[in-house]
Each structure stands twice: as structure tokens, then as C-alpha cells.
Image (tube, helix red, strand yellow):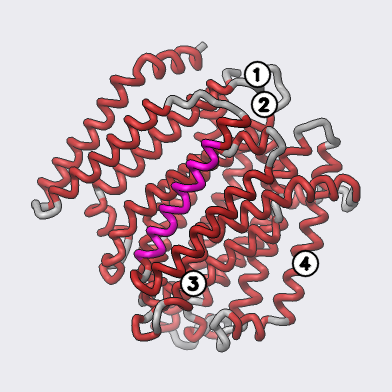
């Protein structure tokens, strides 16, 4: 099969599930912002930032390690069992410690009255970490449909449980106070039901993956595990540094914003508007799901050294990323009406910044192919640590002065720097002929069209939307004129 066609096909399958699933899940944001005050939603954003960190730590790079060793001359079943049992042991140990020390942890992170949040989140993280390898196996075995279905079920159940606990139960008990639901529902739990719903959905994923889970041999090859850990440790460093880059702001804001400026309110505003970049994130996630097994599976083939293919992939990644950026920013006046409660609209100014930052992160991921294929993952850890240092320093400097806007700027600067460094080092060790001129045309044209649209802010909504549609159409026209020959060639090859 044409490799470009295969990547497009897998990205489409992962993308449909990711986009549809995450789009459905994203509807929880307007739901939460309508239901909760910014201070209450700030609790959700703050605690899920901790979850993101913990999930990276508890998987400790084994997902990428599994791809690497299962696809290069090792016994795939042995690699699978070794990585899976390792995660089982560490996940169970983490859950045990979190339950035992939940009161101390709750005090440490600022929730002394809610220790139950700790064990709920610990259970979610433990399950998600443990199931990461079965999901990776589905990807490596080219079973994107099952992967997508399970992810969709998880998201659907999470939404369903949220609606049940946060809307249906209160409605039923208001009209029927003696209904038996009163024995399992308590309004005092409040935002805690967000975490309960997530845990129930994660448990369902555990059940749906039972075939993959019980295919492991419940044995560990110690020598293989040591080798995998050595390979994966830099990936862990990259992951932790990446979480610093993406989530440390939501953890630092409560500590760096003075109490008289209502830090949890700022976390809520920032977290909700950060979520508006979801379409860019969904695109990047779908691409990552397909791209990583794609290039690992080709790494030992006869066309593994095909840098032009990777250059073409990068070009279309940027094109689609800029289309998403323009679609979100040019039509933000429509999006905000359905996406987020008016109490949160003051944070809309961070959306363009976060969209570009996430696009740069996606480019960084695509550029990072060189240190994974060359087994030079230590360079990835160096780059990620540089980014983490920038993020920490800028957040510490800017948050007390600018609040959450400082966090948005820090994210953009960080991802810009690591993208540039990854490109420069990558060209030295694994040269890929990226068409920088063409890439620059698309990026700066899209950025210019966005800034032109700002001139229309004082016009009526209808006129503004019509003019922005002309701007968006002009980008499409430029794209067609520059790429029509290559697009037709790709379509012709795919038909063949």
C-alpha cells in the first residue's frame, strides 16, 4: 500500500474517533462552565493538571519503548508481557500509597477538606497507566477500529455519568425527594462527581480491554525490562518536561496569584479557554496515534530512509494546522456562544496564543522523528528540559504580573523554542529536506489573515463573519494554487 495513503487512512480512523470522541467530551466544558462558577471549575482544571503529570510518570515511557522493541527483532509477546506486568506492579503500588497517604497529599496540594479527591484521581491514573500498553498493542497491530471504539465508549460513558450525577440526580430528587437515589447521591459532593464519572468510565475501559490484558504471560524478562527502561527513561524525562510545558501553569497559578486576585477564579477562566483549542489538540492527537507506529514500522524497511516523505507529511500537517487556527479564530464570535458561558469570555484573548502554541508542539512532535529513529532519545530529554526550564521561569516571572495571560505567553515561547532546537539538531543528525519557503508562506499568510480580521472587530457580527469568510477562502485559494499538482498526484496514486 502507498505509505502516504496508509498514514492518511490510519490518521482518518484515529482522527474520526479522536475528533468525534473529544468533541463530545469537549461539550463538558460549556456544560461545566454553565453549571459551575469559575472558582469551582478551577478545581477541576487544577486537579486534572496533576493527573496529567502522574499519568506520564506512571507510564514512564514504556508505550514508546513497547513500539520500539516489539517492532525490531524482539519477541513481541515477551515485550508485551514485560511492559504490561511492569506497569501493573507500579500502578498498583502507586494506588496503594495514594490511598494510605491521601490526607497528607490533600493538605499538600491545598484540598485538606477533600481527601476523597486523592484516591479517586489515583484510581483513574492507575487504570489509565495500566491500559496504555493494551492500547499501544492495538495500534501496533493495526487495529485502529477497535482502538477507536473503546476510546469512544469511554468518552460516552464519562459524559453519561456526568449528566447522571450532575443533572439527572438533582432533577429527580427535586421532584421526588423520597426516590431511592437519595441513598447514593449527595449534593455536597459537587465537583467530586466529575472525578467519580471519570473513574467509572476508566473501569469500563479496563473491562473492554480484557482480551488484550489477559494475553500477557504474567512474567517479566528482567534483561529485556532493563533494556527497555534504559531506552524509555529519556522518554519519561521528555514526558514530564512536556507536562511541565503544558500543565504546570494550572498548578502554579493558585500559588503565584495573590489571594485578593482570586487565584482559583483565574485557573477556572484560563482552564476553560485553554480547552477551546481542543480542535487543534484533537488533530495533533490523531496524527500522533497514526504517525508513531507508522514510522516505527517503516524504520527497518527498504524505504525507511525516505526523508522526502517526512518533509511532505510536515507540509500537510502545517497546512491542516493553519486551517484549524483560522477556522477557530475567524469564527470565534460564533464558537464562544455555544462553547463557553459568558462568565468566562474575558479569557478568550488567550485562544489564538494557545492555538499557535499547540501547533508548534505538533510540529515539534513531527520533527522529533530523528532522535527516536536514531535511538538518540537523550537529545529529546535535553530539548524537553530546556522547554521545561523556560516554562517554569516565565510562569514564575509572568504570573504574578499578568495572571493567566503570562501562562499563555510562557506556553507559546516554550513550544517555539523547542520546535526550533529540534529542527536544528535534527538537520544535523538526520537531514530531512523540509520546504521552509513553502512552510513559511502558509504559516505567515495564515497569521497575517488573522491579524487582518482584528480590524473588523468593531463591525456588526454578520459583516464581520462575511469578511472573515473571505479571508478564510483566500487561504484556501492560495493553498489550491500552490499544491493542486501534488494533491492530484497523491489522489491518482491512491486510486491506483
Looking at marks 1 and 4 on the same chain, the residue that comes earlier in the sequence is marked by 4
Q: Residue at x 44, y 17 (%)?
A: 491
Which structural element holds mark 1? loop
Question: Residue 136, how many percent across, how many down?
Answer: 68, 44
Which structural element holds mark 2? helix
Residue 283 can be seen in this image: yes
Looking at marks 2 and 4 on the same chain, the residue that comes earlier in the sequence is marked by 4
Residue that mark 2 sits on: 298
**Callouts 3 and 4 close, C-beta under 8 Å:** no
Alpha carbon separation for disc pair 2 and 1:
7 Å
Which structural element holds mark 4? helix
Looking at marks 3 and 1 on the same chain, the residue that comes earlier in the sequence is marked by 3
Circle 1 packing at 10 Å, graded few (<14), some (14-19), many (20+), is: few
Circle 2 packing at 10 Å, graded few (<14), some (14-19), many (20+), is: some
**Callouts 2 and 1 close, C-beta under 8 Å:** yes
Residue that mark 1 sits on: 303
Alpha carbon separation for disc pair 1 and 4:
42 Å
Q: Residue at x 25, y 59 (%)?
A: 337
Q: Nearer the viewer, residue 173 or 53?
A: 53
Residue that mark 4 sits on: 92
Amino acid at each position: 500500500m502507498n505509505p502516504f495513503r496508509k498514514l492518511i487512512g490510519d490518521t482518518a480512523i484515529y482522527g474520526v474517533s479522536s475528533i468525534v470522541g473529544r468533541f463530545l467530551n469537549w461539550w463538558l466544558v460549556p456544560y461545566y462552565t454553565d453549571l459551575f462558577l469559575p472558582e469551582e471549575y478551577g478545581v477541576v482544571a487544577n486537579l486534572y493538571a496533576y493527573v496529567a503529570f502522574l499519568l506520564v510518570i506512571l507510564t514512564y515511557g514504556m508505550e514508546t519503548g513497547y513500539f520500539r522493541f516489539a517492532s525490531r527483532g524482539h519477541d513481541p509477546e515477551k515485550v508485551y508481557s514485560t511492559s504490561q506486568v511492569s506497569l501493573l506492579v507500579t500502578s498498583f503500588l502507586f494506588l496503594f500509597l495514594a490511598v494510605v497517604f491521601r490526607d497528607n497529599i490533600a493538605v499538600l496540594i491545598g484540598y485538606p477538606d477533600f481527601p476523597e479527591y486523592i484516591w479517586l484521581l489515583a484510581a483513574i491514573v492507575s487504570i489509565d497507566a495500566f491500559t496504555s500498553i493494551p492500547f499501544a498493542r492495538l495500534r501496533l497491530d493495526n487495529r485502529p477500529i477497535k482502538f477507536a471504539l473503546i476510546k469512544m465508549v469511554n468518552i460516552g460513558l464519562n459524559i453519561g455519568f456526568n449528566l447522571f450525577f450532575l443533572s439527572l440526580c438533582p432533577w429527580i430528587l427535586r421532584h421526588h425527594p423520597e426516590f431511592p437515589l437519595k441513598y447514593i447521591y449527595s449534593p455536597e459532593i459537587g465537583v467530586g462527581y466529575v472525578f467519580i464519572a471519570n473513574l467509572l468510565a476508566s473501569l469500563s475501559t479496563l473491562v473492554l480491554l480484557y482480551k488484550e490484558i489477559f494475553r500477557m504471560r504474567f512474567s517479566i524478562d528482567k534483561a529485556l525490562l532493563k533494556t527497555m527502561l534504559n531506552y524509555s527513561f529519556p522518554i519519561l524525562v521528555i514526558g514530564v518536561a512536556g507536562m511541565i510545558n503544558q500543565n504546570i501553569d494550572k498548578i502554579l497559578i493558585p500559588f503565584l496569584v495573590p489571594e485578593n486576585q482570586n487565584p482559583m477564579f483565574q485557573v477556572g477562566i484560563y482552564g476553560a479557554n485553554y480547552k477551546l483549542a481542543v480542535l487543534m489538540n484533537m488533530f495533533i492527537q490523531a496524527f500522533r496515534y497514526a504517525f508513531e507506529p507508522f514510522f516505527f514500522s517503516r524504520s527497518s524497511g527498504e524505504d525507511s530512509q525516505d526523508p522526502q516523505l517526512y518533509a511532505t507529511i510536515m507540509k500537510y500537517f502545517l497546512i491542516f494546522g493553519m486551517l484549524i487556527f483560522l477556522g477557530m479564530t475567524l469564527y470565534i464570535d460564533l464558537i464562544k456562544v455555544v462553547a463557553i458561558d459568558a462568565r468566562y469570555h474575558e479569557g478568550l484573548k488567550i485562544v489564538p496564543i494557545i492555538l499557535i502554541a499547540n501547533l508548534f508542539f505538533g510540529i515539534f512532535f513531527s520533527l522529533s522523528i530523528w532522535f527516536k529513529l536514531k535511538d538518540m532519545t537523550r537529545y529529546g530529554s535535553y530539548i524537553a528540559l530546556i522547554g521545561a526550564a523556560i516554562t517554569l521561569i516565565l510562569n514564575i516571572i509572568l504570573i504574578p504580573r499578568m495572571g493567566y495571560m503570562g501562562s499563555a505567553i510562557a506556553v507559546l515561547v516554550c513550544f517555539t523554542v523547542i520546535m526550533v532546537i529540534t529542527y536544528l539538531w535534527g538537520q544535523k543528525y538526520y537531514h530531512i529536506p523540509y520546504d521552509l519557503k513553502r512552510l513559511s508562506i502558509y504559516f505567515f499568510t495564515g497569521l497575517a489573515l488573522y491579524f487582518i480580521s482584528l480590524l473588523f472587530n468593531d463591525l456588526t457580527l454578520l459583516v464581520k463573519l462575511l469578511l472573515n469568510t473571505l479571508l478564510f477562502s483566500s487561504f484556501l485559494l492560495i493553498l489550491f494554487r500552490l499544491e493542486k499538482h501534488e494533491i492530484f498526484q497523491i489522489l491518482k496514486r491512491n486510486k491506483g
